[in-house]
Image (cartoon, rainbow, N blue to C red):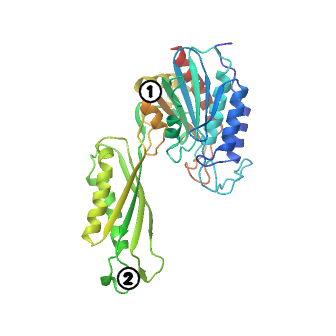
């Protein structure tokens, strides 16, 4: 046993990431990925438990003292890849378009490097399913991922194409938004398009509802707090000369918490129903909370920033990196203190494709940085 981790296996990191990239699996379908992870971790002599949160994998190296959790998500997206690269997705209509393939590779490399060390405490790895569905973390927590041994701190990273490779973004407080979903059915009365006076047009009502929902941010929210309300789907009718009897809307609300987070379900429902009644229609509203804001702990964010400064240099550690995107790592950090960092993955000389796009890809040097950052963070925390 030693206290110094072995060098990073850069070639192995890239090979693992590309293998997973070619075999993407959607949330709660990550059977091949989970099997690969479990086999690797057993080979490293971890205590491995598959099937945690349906398809998640947990690995533990136990020792008396504190326990640190390293989390990596595994799922892909229903996106058809457009990249002409040798490691292009082999599965039609599915793609790792958000970097989770890299997260798995990084997690496995951190596990490899920590395996031979004499650590001052326990290390636990959570390879999580279904982050994109925003309920994989909850499934793992329900299955006891934070227990036996009890987790004292949790860390994770996200490869981030909004930052150039060679930089990281780490800050305390809310860094990723809550994810809420709403569905609105507008029920009117259909009829002939040439006789709208004989109908209650749900398309017109829906258009007013969409416009009014945008005013929630501009007029019903404290202007000093961040929020987004977006209507992303609208479905109504099947013929050009028929006014339908129903229109369906779907969308999302994002906040960093606060009063608007608490008020949003009521405001969306009151807005839709009030406008529908004004036109003689009716609105049914369903509002779902998918994940809470992701909030980094002050002390552990400082620890991770100090580690990043040693790995990359203080000038490469950026503050103020936040996004209205959501992450169900938030559920881990609701229960235990920790930090979630953004690892720059955009090529330095060109504009990177955005996350969730069919041309998304990363600079694979970010894998090395992510593995070094998480390895050093785990060691520093346990040795503190």
Tell me what residue is drawn at x 72 percent, y 52 percent: 90
> How far from the left and from the top, in percent, is residue 306?
49, 22
Q: Residue at x 29, y 48 (%)?
A: 263
Few, some or many residues within 10 Å of mark 1 (<14, 14–19, 20+) = some
Most extreme residue toward the bottom, as rendered?
194
As helix, strand or loop, the secondary structure at mark 1 comes to loop
Nearest the viewer among 340 and 346 is 340
Residue 379's place in the image compared with 346, above or below, is: above
In x, y percent, where is residue 276?
29, 67
* Depicted 156 relative to depicted 290: above or below: above
- Disc 1 or disc 2, which is closer to the eye? 2
Tags 1 and 2 in contact by the CB under 8 Å rule?
no
Mark 2 = which residue?
Answer: 191
Q: Residues within 10 Å of mark 2 (few under 14, many from 20)?
A: some
Asked if residue 88 lies left or right of residue 126, the reply is: right
Q: Quadrant of the N terminus?
A: top right
Q: Is residue 104 left or right of residue 245?
A: right
Q: State the residue in front, 105 or 130.
A: 130
Depth check, front residue: 152 or 178: 152
Q: Earlier in the sequence, mark 1 or mark 2?
A: 2
Q: Can I make out residue 365 in this image?
A: no
- What is the total number of numbered labels drawn onto the structure image? 2
Horizontal side of residue 176 vs 60, given as left or right: left
Q: Which residue corresponds to the image point at 35% horizontal and 45% vertical from the top-left?
A: 226
Image coordinates of residue 193 in percent, x first then y, are 39, 83
Q: Which mark is residue 248?
A: none
The disc at residue 337 is: 1
Which secondary structure lies at badge 2? Answer: strand
CA gap, disc 1 to disc 2? 57 Å
Confirm whether residue 157 shows in the render: yes
Quarter assignment of residue 75? top right
């Amino acid at each position: 046993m030693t206290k110094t981790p072995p060098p990073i296996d850069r070639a192995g990191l890239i090979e693992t990431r590309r293998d997973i990239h070619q075999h993407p699996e959607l949330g709660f379908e990550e059977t091949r990925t989970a099997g690969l992870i479990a086999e690797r971790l057993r080979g490293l002599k971890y205590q491995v438990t598959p099937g945690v949160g349906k398809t998640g994998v947990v690995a533990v190296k136990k020792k008396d003292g504190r326990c640190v959790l390293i989390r990596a998500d595994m799922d892909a997206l229903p996106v058809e890849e457009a990249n002409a690269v040798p490691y292009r997705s082999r599965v039609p209509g599915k793609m790792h378009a958000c970097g989770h393939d890299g997260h798995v590779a990084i997690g496995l490399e951190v596990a490899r490097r920590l395996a031979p060390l004499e650590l001052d405490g326990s290390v636990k790895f959570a390879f999580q399913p279904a982050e994109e569905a925003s309920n994989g973390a909850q499934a793992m927590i329900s299955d006891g991922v934070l227990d036996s041994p009890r987790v004292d701190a949790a860390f994770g990273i996200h490869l981030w194409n909004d930052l150039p490779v060679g930089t990281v973004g780490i800050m305390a407080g809310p860094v990723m938004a809550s994810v809420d979903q709403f569905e609105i059915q507008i029920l009117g009365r259909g009829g002939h398009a040439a006789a709208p006076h004989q109908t209650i047009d749900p398309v017109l009502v829906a258009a007013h509802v969409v416009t009014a929902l945008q005013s929630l941010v501009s007029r019903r929210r404290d202007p000093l707090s961040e929020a987004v309300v977006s209507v992303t789907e609208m479905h109504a009718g099947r013929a050009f000369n028929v006014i339908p009897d129903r229109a369906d809307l779907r969308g999302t609300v994002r906040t960093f918490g606060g009063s608007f987070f608490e008020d949003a379900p009521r405001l969306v429902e009151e807005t839709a129903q009030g406008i529908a009644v004004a036109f003689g229609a009716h609105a049914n509203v369903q509002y779902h909370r998918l994940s809470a804001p992701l909030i980094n702990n002050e002390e552990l964010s400082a620890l991770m920033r100090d580690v990043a400064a040693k790995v990359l240099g203080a000038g490469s550690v950026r503050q103020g990196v936040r996004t209205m995107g959501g992450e169900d790592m938030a559920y881990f950090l609701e229960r235990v203190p920790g930090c979630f960092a953004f690892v720059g993955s955009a090529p330095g000389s060109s504009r990177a494709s955005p996350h969730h796009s069919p041309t998304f890809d990363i600079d694979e040097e970010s894998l090395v940085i992510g593995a070094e950052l998480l390895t050093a963070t785990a060691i520093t925390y346990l040795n503190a």
